[in-house]
Image: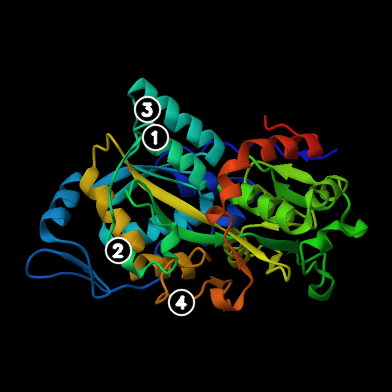
Amino acid sequence: MPRRAIPPVRQSRRGVCSALLAGLLAVLVTAACGADSGTTAEVEEDASGALIIDSEEIADGELWAAAQDQGGFTMYTGQSEPQEAALVEAFQDQTGLSVDLTHIPTGRLFERIQSEHAAGVSQADVIRHTDRTLWRSHADEGVLQPYCPLFLDEVVNQELLEENCMFTPTIQSIYAIGYNSALIQPDDAPQSWTDLLDPRWEDSVGLTHIGVGGSAWGRDLFLRDTHGVEYWENLADQSPYIAGSGSVITQELARGEIEVGMVLPGTQALAQEGGAPVATVVPSDGVPSYIEWAGIAAGAENLEAAQVFMNWTMSLAGQTVVTEEIGSYSLRADAPPPTWNGEEQPPIEELDFVFPETTEAYVTDRDAAQAEWFTIFGYQPS
């Protein structure tokens, strides 16, 4: 039977760094919660009052003036806590706008957003989480308002764009294999997804459950499609440690409670920078990717500040923060590859990248496949 992780605590607004610094999870966000972002950018206002960052216009004079009057916006996110903290900090450093942040894992965040909207009490201006299927539900329910951020022409994979601009791909992340570098030598670490099925790793593998969000669903759809449902069954036989957050998997690796796991490289990199004994391997048998989507809530009170954030996220400055500060891949070709613990990673074209969210099965098989996964693993989220 799988071991169950203690559910992660909901992150309150205004305090993403201070709250996360409690306990061992502090290792994951030490780098993210510094006084200044590590990524430099040239910020200026031109004669018309437009906001210019690294030679790109992020907001014209009218939009920028309105955003400054608002001072900031409220954001609901399902993205990994330390990664979102790093991204938000860089945005605040470069623009001076504040972000009132609430973090909840994607599955629970979706439920909260839908229920708040139904009750007419939505508090978010910007929403970010994974799972394209859930985003289309948001759009169908009237949760979102259309906004086409600047720089969408720079997105390499145009198949990821929604025609109505109800929501936008903002970050391209991957799943990889992590291990505790104090317990395992690099030559002994798993190099492929099938290596995790080695009897050596029984009772020592960690992973998030399939219902966490689009990231885990895309990962497990990829594993089922490439290795058959037998992969799920054989992984369940390893008695894995199952958690409701990717940050928890990295935390448990750092503590040595598990030795290997399915991890988010950006979270791993931030932990390494904080001194945690963790390392990451890009698997040789395929790299499942997923998108962190974002959109503006239908009733956004700070609309212009939200629009500036969306523009900045898709700008070269924003996408460079994505690669250099949170270790994810950019949606733009002109941004550098990600950096993990100071080491630049291979560009997308050199990896066996897979895009589960662009397949029909991602939508049609989701509910039935997740139910099957929970049955195989004998697990239900609390």
Query: What kind of residue is marked 4?
Result: Pro
The image position of residue 308, as x and y in percent, is: 25, 55
Query: What kind of residue is marked 1?
Result: Asp
Q: Label 3 vs label 4: CA separation?
A: 38 Å
The image position of residue 263, as x and y in percent, is: 66, 57
> Is 376 rendered above or below residue 194?
above
- Earlier along the polypeptide chain: callout 1 or callout 4? 1
> Is 131 rendered above or below residue 335?
above
Q: Label 2 vs label 4: CA separation?
A: 19 Å
Query: What kind of residue is marked 3?
Result: His
The image position of residue 299, as x and y in percent, is: 27, 34
Query: Circle 4 is placed at which residue position?
Result: 336
Residue 94, numbered circle:
2
* Circle 2 SS class: helix
Query: Circle 3 is placed at which residue position?
Result: 117
- Earlier along the polypeptide chain: callout 3 or callout 4? 3
Query: Circle 1 is placed at which residue position?
Result: 140
Q: Quadrant of the N terminus?
A: top right
Q: Label 1 vs label 3: CA separation?
A: 12 Å
The image position of residue 316, as x and y in percent, is: 35, 70
**Number of the front mark, 3 or 2:** 3
Q: Quadrant of the C terminus?
A: top right
Query: What kind of residue is marked 2?
Result: Gln
* Circle 1 SS class: helix
What residue sits 49% from the left and 36% below the top? 109
* Circle 4 SS class: loop
| Callout 1 crowding tier (Cα within 10 Å): few <14, some 14–19, many ≥20 | few
